[in-house]
Amino acid sequence: MEGTAALRAAGLPAQFQRQLVMPMLDGGRLAGVLLVADAARPYDDDDRRHVEHIADAATKLLRRRRSDAEIVTAMDHMERVMFGAIEALAQLAETQDACKSGRARRVGDYAAGIGTALGLPGHTVRGLRVAGQLIDVGMLQIPRELLWRPGVLSASEFELVKTHAERGFEVMRAVEFPWPVAEAVRQHHERLDGSGYPRGLKGEEILLEARIVAVADAVEAMLSPRPHRPALTLAACLDELQSQAGRRYDARVVKACVKLLRDGQVAAVPVQHEGEAPAGQRIA
């Protein structure tokens, strides 16, 4: 009765006058059954050979599809491992500075949001999020006592801190990311007018990814408190960005970021409305 019901459920007649059944074996395991039925004449050996060839071809197709599915599953797993490792490394870098908890995630969110607003492909946006999370990896090689000490850094101390961009590049260049993460880390403090570091690049010499991460980094820094100055208001942050558009920062990137912040499409850190720091100390 169960067999009859199954046939009817599949849209087949409950009974066959003639039938030929061929098992579909995959490495000795039964992968399925090929049923041929109700021919006008009895099935002969040629029919059996033909059905056997069809069953073999169908088994190979099923095996290939299963293999493809297993590859996709393995790739998904490796991607989760990669992003987990990235997040762990970013959090480790944050431990160098007690004032920057959650900074890596915020910079990554800002960078990805800007990339999306610019209409960049999803693959590129994912790379922006990764690069944004990793910009401070080089800080792991900067003495913690220097980063934790309150007050403004001396000129020589600031020069040491500035080496984090090149140090981060040296760490990340060994990882074969599908995005220019290492170069974005290296260039995220470069500025359009050539006033940035470590190489004083100008304009189009700077990767688009680095120009985007630079704005994301600046926004996060301005909207977050630091030991030597309080956080800016959102309005002051936007004014600072727009005043430097086309000079220090890419104008298109600034425009996209300003719209994101005004529309509240990316989560900003809490900002204060009093005690705003002077312009010269806005960006850490």
Image (cartoon, grey):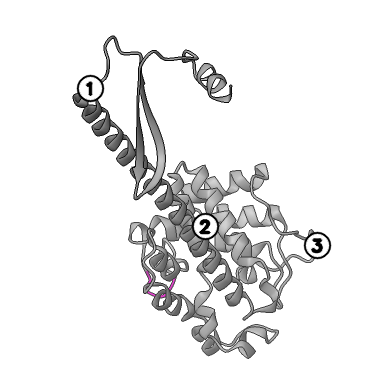
Where, quadrant-wise, is the C terminus in this rendering? bottom right
Q: Are marks 1 and 2 in contact (CB under 8 Å)?
A: no
Q: Secondary structure at mark 3?
A: loop
Mark 1 / mark 2, whichever is N-terminal: 1
Q: CA distance from mark 1 to mark 2?
A: 64 Å
* Residue marked by disc 1: 44
Name the residue nearer the viewer: 16 or 200. Answer: 16
Residue at coordinates 40% horizontally, 68% vertically from top-left?
182
Question: Foreground residue, 91 or 20?
Answer: 20
Give the CA separation, mark 3 to mark 1: 92 Å
Tell me which label, 3 or 1, sits earlier in the chain. 1
Q: Please name the residue that numbered disc 3 is placed on.
A: 274
Q: Is residue 100 above or below residue 154?
A: above
* Image coordinates for residue 179, horizontal then vertical, percent: 39, 59
Q: Amino acid at mark 1?
A: Asp
What's drawn in magenta, residue-wise? 196-200
95 or 229: nearer the viewer: 95
The residue that disc 2 covers is: 129
